[in-house]
Image (cartoon, rainbow, N blue to C red):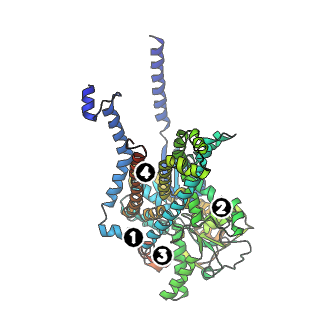
């Protein structure tokens, strides 16, 4: 054989060898978790724990990959074909959209405890050192000289919770008087300095660009920001009345079956309810239901009256249609 | 063979392969341009005409048109002036760092628009270098329409510079010298000799810059402030519709931007064609 022939044939042999060994090595199962934007650090901590636990229980090595993005963008991606096995979102509506499309079981909220929500949070305020504007509750936000920063409710679930919390507070405060509620909400919205498209954008505006007197976001996020940027420079205020923000999880049945990961997906989500994970979640400033952990972290989470979306607004679908849809109340209140 | 080619194309072409190259070009354009546009119109087909008009004439959307078009117009005009100046400097003068400046002109093309947006926002916010200087003087740039126009100007300046540069290079320096030697002042030389030569390129470049600015999202969204009726751009309205899973609504607003862009580009092309024909005595 000539030299080129030998070379060509050995190249083919090497390529085949690599492919075969490659496939042999890739026997490890992989699971994809589609999550919301600000959960990166959280799952970076959870996933190794689960992998170690699964290794112990079943002697199998597994890989978990994460996808993060705005909750609605993530749901859209899955609708359009992203093969996520589980979803861990921060909005019930985004999981419901998947259920309506048949990707997630219809009774997904009964599949796990607490409405399929292993942890929850609420809306809280982050103010600058010393709380110069004296912000203690929602009505202080309607004061003339207060500049508020929170993400755009039109593009962010986080922002929607803030809007609904403010509305819920106003409803209690003004005993359901529509006019007064709308007046309050109008002033509240006018006080917003800048509408970023997402939670992290709002954080950047408040912290780096030094815009606004108060940042409104999830209690967990607000606490995490404070620990990251300096506990001395910022204070967390949890208003006496706020909204219950559930973080729903679900197995994407269709994808999990196709990938042969159903048992893995199911166990992964159940694992989030174990005491060690609940403790880890509390460490990330999320509120949990596990009683032992709740007692341990009692000082970290102030008492607050948590309004439920279903109680105040009927249902998430109704809230979306009445308030956030095109031409809905949010549009009307912002109209000039 | 050449007779067959002349019958098909109407003239004898020396270069063979018209059929194949045309075929490949059409395939490419179909895949890259026409297929996505067809998809867009497919989404639109779900709406009735009444629904379509309701979506595109909604108050907040119309306000976004005003903001976007207004800021894009300002950015385009600013870029026309300074782009021309930049192209002139790059073509007519020699100076140390000229190649660097030339390469820098392509920076807005190469830089991811999100990075551009964040950089501009950080720079012009109250706590940034420029913002810290300007805001005490009363000029707020970030979170106002000025910031939007600024971001648009940044991303679209290469269009003007790169369109005018080759035409200026074609214009020999002797032409200005001849004008001067015949007694023209600077102003007259520019208006009567140089400008007529580069006018089409300048208009095309400005038109491209304007159309580019209409569609820009990433660079603007961080510096814009996104306050309804004040600093919301049309691209954000499209994004919001997508967030509401309203694909048809998003396509409707997108079709408006598309229509404006295409109309403008077509108009410029037609006008330019006529102008060039007049200039070259009917042979353009």
Residue A57 appears in the rendering? no
Q: How far is disc 3 from disc 4 in space, using C-alphas?
A: 34 Å
**Do the CB atoms of the residues marked 4 and 2 lie less than 8 Å apart?**
no
**Secondary-structure class at tag 3:** helix
Residue A330: give its label: 3
Residue at the image position 61 percent from the left and 66 percent from the top: A220
The C terminus of chain B sits in image quarter: top left
Q: How far is disc 1 from disc 4 in space, using C-alphas?
A: 38 Å
Residue B120: give its label: none
A85 or B160, nearer to the observer: B160
Q: Nearer the viewer, mark 3 or mark 4?
A: 3
A240 or A81, nearer to the observer: A81
Residue B57: give its label: 1
**Secondary-structure class at tag 2:** helix
Q: Residue B95: x percent and y percent?
A: 68, 40
**Which chain does tag 4 point to?**
A
Evaluate whether label 3 is on the same chain as label 4.
yes
- Relative vertical location of residue B20 with respect to residue B112 in this rendering, above or below: above
Which residue does the numbered mark 2 point to in the structure image?
A: B124
Evaluate whether label 4 is on the same chain as label 2.
no
Sequence-first disc among 1 and 2: 1
Q: How far is disc 1 from disc 2 in space, using C-alphas?
A: 33 Å
Which residue does the numbered mark 4 point to in the structure image?
A: A83
Residue at the image position 49 percent from the left and 33 percent from the top: A22
Q: Nearer the viewer, mark 3 or mark 2?
A: 2
Other residues around mark 3 within 10 Å, as few (<14) / some (14–19) / many (≥20) = many
Other residues around mark 4 within 10 Å, as few (<14) / some (14–19) / many (≥20) = some
Q: Quadrant of residue B51?
A: bottom left
């Amino acid at each position: 054989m000539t030299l080129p022939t030998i070379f060509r044939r050995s190249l083919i042999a090497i390529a085949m060898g690599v492919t075969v060994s490659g496939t042999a090595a890739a026997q490890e199962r992989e699971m994809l978790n589609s999550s919301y934007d600000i959960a990166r650090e959280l799952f970076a901590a959870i996933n190794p724990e689960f992998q170690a636990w699964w290794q112990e229980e079943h002697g199998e090595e597994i890989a978990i990959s994460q996808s993060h993005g705005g909750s609605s963008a993530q749901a859209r991606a899955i609708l359009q074909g992203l093969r996520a096995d589980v979803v861990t979102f921060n909005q019930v509506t985004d999981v419901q959209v998947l259920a309506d499309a048949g990707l997630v079981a219809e009774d997904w909220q009964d599949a796990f405890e607490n409405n399929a929500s292993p942890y929850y949070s609420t809306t809280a305020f982050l103010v600058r050192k010393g709380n110069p504007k004296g912000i203690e509750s929602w009505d202080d936000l309607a004061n003339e000289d207060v500049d508020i920063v929170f993400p755009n409710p039109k593009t962010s679930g986080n922002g929607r919770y803030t809007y609904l919390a403010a509305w819920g507070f106003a409803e209690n405060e003004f005993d359901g008087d529509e006019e007064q509620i709308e007046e309050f909400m109008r002033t509240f919205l006018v006080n917003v300095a800048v509408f970023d498209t997402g939670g992290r954008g709002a954080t950047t505006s408040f912290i780096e660009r030094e815009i606004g007197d108060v940042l409104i976001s999830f209690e967990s996020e607000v606490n995490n920001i404070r620990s990251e940027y300096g506990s001395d420079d910022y204070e967390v205020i949890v208003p006496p009345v706020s909204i219950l923000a559930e973080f729903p999880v679900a197995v994407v049945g269709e994808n999990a079956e196709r990938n042969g990961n159903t048992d893995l997906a199911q166990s992964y989500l159940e694992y989030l309810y174990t005491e060690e994970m609940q403790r880890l979640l509390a460490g990330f400033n999320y509120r949990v239901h596990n009683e032992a952990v709740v007692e341990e972290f009692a000082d970290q989470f102030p008492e607050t009256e948590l309004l439920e979306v279903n109680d105040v607004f009927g249902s998430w679908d109704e809230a979306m249609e009445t308030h956030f849809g095109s031409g809905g109340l949010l549009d009307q209140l912002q109209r000039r | 063979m050449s007779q067959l080619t002349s019958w098909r194309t109407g003239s004898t072409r020396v270069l063979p392969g018209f059929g194949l190259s045309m075929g490949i070009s059409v395939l490419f354009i179909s895949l890259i341009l026409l297929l996505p546009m067809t998809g867009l119109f497919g989404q639109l087909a779900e709406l009735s005409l009444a629904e379509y008009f309701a979506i595109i004439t909604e108050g907040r959307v119309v306000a976004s048109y005003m903001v976007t078009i207004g800021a894009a117009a300002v950015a385009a005009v600013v870029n026309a002036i300074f782009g021309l100046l930049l192209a002139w400097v790059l073509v007519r003068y020699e100076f140390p760092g000229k190649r660097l400046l030339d390469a820098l002109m392509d920076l807005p093309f190469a830089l991811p628009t999100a990075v551009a947006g964040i950089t501009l926002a950080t720079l012009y916010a109250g706590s940034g270098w420029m913002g810290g200087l300007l805001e005490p003087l009363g000029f707020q740039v970030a979170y106002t329409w000025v910031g939007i126009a600024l971001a648009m100007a940044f991303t679209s300046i290469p269009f003007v510079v790169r369109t005018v540069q080759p035409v200026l290079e074609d214009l020999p320096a002797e032409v200005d010298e001849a004008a001067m030697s015949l007694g023209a002042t600077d102003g007259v030389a520019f208006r009567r000799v140089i400008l007529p030569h580069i006018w089409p390129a300048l208009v095309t470049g400005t038109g491209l810059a304007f159309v580019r600015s209409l569609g820009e999202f990433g660079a603007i969204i961080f510096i814009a402030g996104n306050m309804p009726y004040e600093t919301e751009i049309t691209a954000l309205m499209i994004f919001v519709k997508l967030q509401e899973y309203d694909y048809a609504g998003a396509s409707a607003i997108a079709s408006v931007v598309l229509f404006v862009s295409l109309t403008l580009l077509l108009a410029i092309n037609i006008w330019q064609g006529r102008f060039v024909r007049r200039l070259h005595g009917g042979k353009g």
